[in-house]
């Protein structure tokens, strides 16, 4: 049994002594314990012929595994002249005890084959004292509670709960918000002269004087005129007698003709209301047409312009 490993141990020295070897292989240490790692360095020249590297898989042999391959790397080589070489480091391990031969790596240098030296790796086992009793299992140690760690672990649930809570709050606010009532469009204000002309026309359609109600007709007609004057010129026309009202209207914007027409209508109405006079049909009709004309002639300028448009 000693013959094979003695030959394998002496093989690297014999191959290293071969002249003209241009590629080399070197272990960082010749022996390891089972499961430990060791570095195998492969070196090939740069200056000179082209070099083709061998293919390297996950294992070198059935007992030696390749854990990591650094890939080719160019380095400087000490010597009388400036030279460079390409190195490639393999991290190896083994889980079988014994002496394991690493076969030569075959390169192609300038079209010719070249091999590295064979190596021997000694994988040693771990010494176990069989006389010592087995040690008991270590107790289970519970880590201290960390709120930050718990939050990082359960953040999807926390985010979901926060999202549901926010959605519920927004829904509650939406349901409890005061309902916005549709704005009610304000009815356009009817100009003063249109209101009173419409009231006079409505009085005419009642046909009071045609039914013998001369006093009622004259009273309501003059009351509409007095209300118009009071609203139009800010004069208390409803509380004044005819003479008092006409005296106050002397300093108003009314023309002399308008004041005269207005005074005649008020005096005719006073005769009907207080002296029981009976006006003719023509006088009743003239009273209505004169009142309508007076209101329209004295309408404010802006409303008359709007009406003209």
Image (spheres, rainbow, N blue to C red):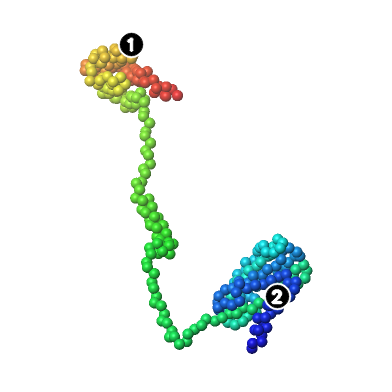
Q: Quadrant of residue 214?
A: top left
- Image spot of residue 118 (x, y percent): 68, 77
Q: Is residue 308 above or below residue 185?
A: above
Of residue 261 and residue 34, the one placed in the foreground of this image is 34
Residue placed furthest toward the top: 256
Residue at x 73% of width, y 75% of height: 18
Label 2: state its secondary structure: helix
Is the residue 69 above or below the residue 274 in the image?
Answer: below
Q: Which residue is mark 2?
A: 16
In the displayed structure image, the side of residue 216 where residue 84 appears, left or right: right
Which of the 4 quarters of the picture holds residue 189? top left
Alpha carbon separation for disc pair 2 and 1 = 145 Å
User: Which residue is labeled 1 in the image?
Assistant: 256
The answer to whether one can see residue 276 in this image is: no
Task: Report the residue that reaches farthest toward the left.
Answer: 274
Which residue is depicted at the point 64% across and 78% down? Answer: 120
Q: Is residue 119 above or below residue 268?
A: below
Q: Position of residue 185 (x, y in %)?
A: 38, 36
Q: Is residue 108 left or right of residue 288?
A: right
């Amino acid at each position: 049994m000693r013959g094979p490993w003695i030959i394998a141990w002496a093989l690297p020295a014999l191959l290293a002594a071969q002249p003209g070897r241009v590629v080399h292989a070197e272990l960082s240490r010749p022996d390891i314990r089972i499961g430990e790692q060791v570095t195998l360095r492969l070196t090939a020249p740069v200056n000179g012929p082209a070099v083709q590297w061998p293919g390297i898989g996950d294992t070198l042999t059935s007992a030696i595994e390749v854990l990591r391959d650094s890939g080719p790397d160019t380095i400087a080589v000490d010597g009388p002249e400036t030279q460079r070489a390409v190195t490639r480091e393999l991290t190896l391990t083994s889980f079988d005890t014994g002496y394991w031969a690493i076969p030569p790596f075959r390169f192609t240098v300038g079209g010719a084959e070249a091999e590295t030296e064979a190596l021997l790796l000694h994988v040693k086992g771990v010494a176990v004292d069989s006389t010592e009793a087995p040690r008991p299992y270590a107790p289970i140690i519970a880590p201290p509670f960390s709120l930050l760690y718990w939050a990082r672990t359960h953040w999807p649930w926390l985010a979901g709960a926060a999202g549901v809570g926010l959605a519920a709050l927004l829904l509650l606010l939406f349901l409890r918000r005061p309902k916005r009532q549709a704005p009610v469009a304000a009815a356009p204000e009817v100009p003063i002269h249109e209101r009173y002309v419409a009231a006079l026309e409505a009085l005419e359609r009642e046909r009071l004087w045609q039914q013998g109600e001369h006093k009622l007709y004259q009273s309501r007609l003059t009351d509409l005129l007095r209300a118009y004057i009071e609203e139009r010129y800010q004069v208390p026309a409803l509380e004044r007698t005819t003479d008092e009202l006409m005296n106050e209207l002397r300093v108003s914007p009314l023309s002399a003709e308008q004041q005269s027409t207005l005074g005649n209508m008020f005096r005719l109405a006073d005769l009907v209301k207080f002296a029981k006079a009976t006006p003719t049909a023509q006088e009743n009709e003239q009273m209505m047409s004169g009142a309508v004309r007076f209101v329209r002639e004295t309408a404010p300028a802006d409303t008359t312009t709007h009406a003209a448009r």
